Image (cartoon, rainbow, N blue to C red):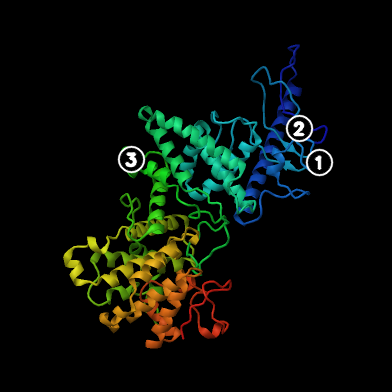
């Protein structure tokens, strides 16, 4: 491979001599040189790609900056020869006339001698092998860069290897999916490039426009489409429905809660975008026409649709129910013996029965909660204990997948609980509406913050704490009895922490102050009572502390410092 002129590029081509004479030693040497060059080029590309993945997951600003402050991505799009930019030139050579070419892998370097990764022409990603590419020109460096980023960085977070292979095949053959994936990749790169205010950059908007145009053409012929094509359209709609970017800034808006499993920590995207309801409704309608989630054949598609379903219901309202039956199997109570050893379960935990009997407080409320509701609340308590314990004792891959399936199934059961009006008359007669609805809402708040974490950017915490504020009537507390006092404390503390930086924060601070004036409780006693419901101290290191551990100055919801819930 020649590299004359600094940035020039040449392909390694082996051809027989025109005179037909046999030159076995020369041909063997050239073959060996081509093989060595291919191996070195492949190794360099792999190392560059691995560095990209590592830096991105660690939160390092990527793409890396050049001397003038610009990024590699931008320099590729700028005209050659512009001052202060990287110039890439390609020396044109005719393609080989025969099939004797050993390698067509290209190595790119800029003026400063730095290697630039560019996918080989016959396979966009070596992870998936060579396929037919009909959606874009492989010499388009920008599109190739987006495809490489989405397949090697984003997909490993959201799907399994089996799903990736099918998605990659569809990406290379379906214009709709290609432009949809490039739209999301452009948005992610904009976020990683600190373009937090206007993520709808030109590249993302261009791909989104082409995706919408191709989608309209596809829908016109939907009656004659195969199931595989329809499922590709469903996947495209679900992706677009979760990537409707707003124009307001993406400031760090964190809750004092700390999720047990923060699967999206590295780019903080999942759940932030507004719901694209037309896309979502069309996708769910098409899924229903195909026979539901279990009738879908594309790997990973049913899983994504089910996740979108429960994420929307968890974020919208406690009265919004999932559209589909539970897709996952498993119960947290069945995993308890495998994740927490018997000696840990029988040992006293700060003097409480939290590990021994998770959710014990739900069974001791006056009257009797509906059987289905009690079962779900106890499952949530078990799930909370398992996830909290797993932070210090990380499970293996197979156990982690079992835990994730059980957690999603439990969240689905929680969102599927019926409203009070839909309960049988016998269960309404033996329970109390106030207690039932506050149990449901508070469990949903804790689930969204700790168990199935959703960023508060979409405003779910504001909506749910507003519902609690409407239902929670202090004048009704005396009619229920003293046995419910620990339950009121749990509702006020969880809702008060979740209402951080919302107008509801002042209300819960006042309600908690009046509660403690009426019933003084020490910090240690409060922790014991909270542990009888659903509560994990590692999940709330700043929102609920001892008064002597913080500054005497009270901090309201509008302050910029760490939120504090006072319990003296």
The residue to which callout 2 is attached is: 89
Residue placed under numbered mark 1 in the picture: 83
Mark 2: few/some/many CA within 10 Å (<14, 14-19, 20+): some
Relative depth, front residue between 453 and 337: 453
| Residue depicted at 41% across the width and 63% down the height | 463
Neighbours of disc 1 within 10 Å: few (<14), some (14-19), many (20+): few
- Going from N to C along the chain, the mark reached first, 2 or 3, is 2
- The structure residue drawn at horizontal position 72% and vertical position 28%, both measured from the top left corner, is 12
Whichever of labels 3 and 1 marks the residue nearer the N terminus, that label is 1
Label 1 – label 2 distance at C-alpha: 15 Å
Name the side, left or right, on which 88 lies relative to 133. Answer: right
Tell me the CA gap for discs 3 and 1.
Answer: 56 Å
Is 454 situated above or below 198?
A: below
428 shown above or below 95: below
Residue at point 42% right, 71% down?
495
Q: CA distance from mark 2 to mark 3?
A: 50 Å
**342 or 178: nearer the viewer:** 178
Per the image, the residue denoted by label 3 is: 295
Residue 246, image x, y percentages: 53, 51
Q: Earlier in the sequence, mark 1 or mark 2?
A: 1
Pick the front one: 173 or 511 = 511
Say left or right for 80 vs 132.
right
**How many tags in the picture?**
3
Relative to residue 143, is residue 197 depicted above or below? below
The x, y position of residue 376, in whole percent, is 31, 64
């Amino acid at each position: 491979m020649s590299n004359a002129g600094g940035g020039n590029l040449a392909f390694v081509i082996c051809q027989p001599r025109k005179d037909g004479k046999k030159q076995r030693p020369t041909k063997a040497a050239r073959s060996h040189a081509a093989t060595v060059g291919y191996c070195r080029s492949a190794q360099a590309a792999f190392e560059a790609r691995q560095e990209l993945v590592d830096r991105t997951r660690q939160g390092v600003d990527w793409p890396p900056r050049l001397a003038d402050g610009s990024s590699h991505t931008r320099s590729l799009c700028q005209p050659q020869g512009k001052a202060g930019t990287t110039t890439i030139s390609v020396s044109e050579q005719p393609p080989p006339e025969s099939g004797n070419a050993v390698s067509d892998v290209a190595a790119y370097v800029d003026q400063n001698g730095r290697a630039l990764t560019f996918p080989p022409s016959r396979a966009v990603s070596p992870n998936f092998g060579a396929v037919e590419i009909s959606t874009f020109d492989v010499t388009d460096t920008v599109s190739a860069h987006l495809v490489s980023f989405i397949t090697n960085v984003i997909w490993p977070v959201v799907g399994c290897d089996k799903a990736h292979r099918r998605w990659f095949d569809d990406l290379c053959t379906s214009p709709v999916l290609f432009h949809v994936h490039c739209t999301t990749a452009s948005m992610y790169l904009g976020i990683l490039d600190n373009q937090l205010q206007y993520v709808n950059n030109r590249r993302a908007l261009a791909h989104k426009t082409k995706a919408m145009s191709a989608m309209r053409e596809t829908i016109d012929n939907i009656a004659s489409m195969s199931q595989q094509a329809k499922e590709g359209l469903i996947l495209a709609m679900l992706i677009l429905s979760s990537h409707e970017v707003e124009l307001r800034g993406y400031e760090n808006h964190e809750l004092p809660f700390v999720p047990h499993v923060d699967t999206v920590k590295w780019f903080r995207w999942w759940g932030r975008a507004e719901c694209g309801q037309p896309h979502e409704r069309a996708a769910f309608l098409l899924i229903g026409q195909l026979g539901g989630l279990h009738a879908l054949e594309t790997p990973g598609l049913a899983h994504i649709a089910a996740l979108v379903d429960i994420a929307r219901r968890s974020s919208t309202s406690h009265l919004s129910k999932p559209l589909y039956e539970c897709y996952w199997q498993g119960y947290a109570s069945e995993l308890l013996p495998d994740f927490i050893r018997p000696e840990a379960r029988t040992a006293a935990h700060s003097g409480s029965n939290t590990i021994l009997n998770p959710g014990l407080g739900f069974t001791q409320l006056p009257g009797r909660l509906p059987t289905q509701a009690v079962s779900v609340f106890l499952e949530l308590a078990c799930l909370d204990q398992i996830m909290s314990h797993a932070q210090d004792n990380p499970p293996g891959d197979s156990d982690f997948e079992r835990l994730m399936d059980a957690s999603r199934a439990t969240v689905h059961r929680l969102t599927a609980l019926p409203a009070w009006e839909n309960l049988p008359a016998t269960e309404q007669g033996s329970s109390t509406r106030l207690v039932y609805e506050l149990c449901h809402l508070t469990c949903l708040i804790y689930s969204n913050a700790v168990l199935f974490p959703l960023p508060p950017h979409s405003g779910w915490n504001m909506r749910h704490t507003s519902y609690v504020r409407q239902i929670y009537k202090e004048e009704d507390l005396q009619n229920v009895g003293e046995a419910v006092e620990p339950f009121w404390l749990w509702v006020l503390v969880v809702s008060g922490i979740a209402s951080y930086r919302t107008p509801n924060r002042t209300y819960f601070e006042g309600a908690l102050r009046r509660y403690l004036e009426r019933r003084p409780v020490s910090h240690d006693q409060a922790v014991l009572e909270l542990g009888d419901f659903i509560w994990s101290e590692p999940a709330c290191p700043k929102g609920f502390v001892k008064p002597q551990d913080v500054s005497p100055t009270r901090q309201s919801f509008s302050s910029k410092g760490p939120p504090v819930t006072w319990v003296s």
